Image (cartoon, rainbow, N blue to C red):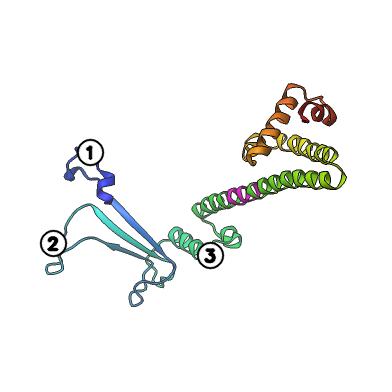
Amino acid sequence: MMDLDLLEKGQKYNQLQKNIVIFICTFQPFVRSGRHRYFFEKRCVQETELALEDGVTTVILSTRGTKKDIDEEMAAFLRYVEDSSEEVADRSDSELVKLIHAKVCAVKQSKVREAEYMKLQERDQNNFQKGRSEGLREGRSEGLREGKREGFLYMIQMTRALMRQENGTNMLKNLPEEDAEIAGKIAGLILENENLSDEDILNKISV
């Protein structure tokens, strides 16, 4: 299957480029040997001098090697694979390790930001729903008109807050259909005239 991915349609098999498959292990796959690095090629079991010569080499790297079979740059990389901590990266003299660690940190930070964004989105949507629900509850206890008024005012305030956030417009679209429609009207009025007060907007959308 890998060969199929490497060959364009219509190309001959002898045009297949050499490729290397690398496995990085945090254990020692061949305890008796104790190497950090192993190279494998396809050979005949009966006559090992016969190689298939298909251009495929498999490399296994082990962080648990004991022999001095690699240079310091590779050793530093394998130490980092074993323990990808800030301390290990700071102590390392390898520019490769420092570069990899910077990329790892960037990816982790991106994931954290994505998670935080999702939490904020969920929180804001919940607050929108809360405002609407509170308005309806107040409507039952204090009169429907006043309750709806409070609910709409809360939604206006939340819409303003979301519009100030990055991707806030998309977050408004992801609200439940009924709320998204009202929020869309509010957002439209704000875009038309950002100086409109909450009361002005309320008067224009209240039914």
Left or right placement of residue 152 versus residue 49 in this view:
right
Q: Along the line of sight, which residue is nearer the eye, 55 or 182?
A: 182
Describe the element under mark 1 as helix, strand or loop: loop
**Residue wearing tag 3:** 83
Mark nearer the viewer, 2 or 1: 1
Q: Which residues are magenta?
A: 110-117
Taking the magenta stretch, the answer to whether it contains residue 143 is no
Asked whether, in this view, residue 55 is left or right of residue 98, the answer is: left
Considering the whole magenta stretch, tell me its main secondary structure.
helix
Q: Which residue lies at the image location 75% right of the left edge and 43% below the top edge?
A: 132
Question: Is disc 1 surrounded by few (<14), some (14 to 19) or many (20+) residues within 10 Å?
Answer: few
The correct choice, above or below, for 101 with respect to 32 in the image is: above
Q: Position of residue 13 (x, y in %)?
A: 18, 45
Q: Residue at x 64, y 42 (%)?
A: 176
Instruction: Tell me which label, 2 or 1, sits earlier in the chain.
Output: 1
Q: Quick one: SS at disc 2?
A: loop
Amino acid marked by disc 3: Asp
Provide residue 124's location: percent of width, then percent of height.
71, 45
- Label 1 vs label 3, nearer the camera: 1
Q: Amino acid at mark 2?
A: Leu
Is 78 above or below relative to 105? below
**Residue at the spot of label 1:** 9
Q: Is residue 80 above or below residue 152?
A: below
- Asked if the residue under mark 3 is in contact with the one under mark 2, i.e. CB atoms within 8 Å, the reply is no
Label 1 sits on what residue type?
Lys
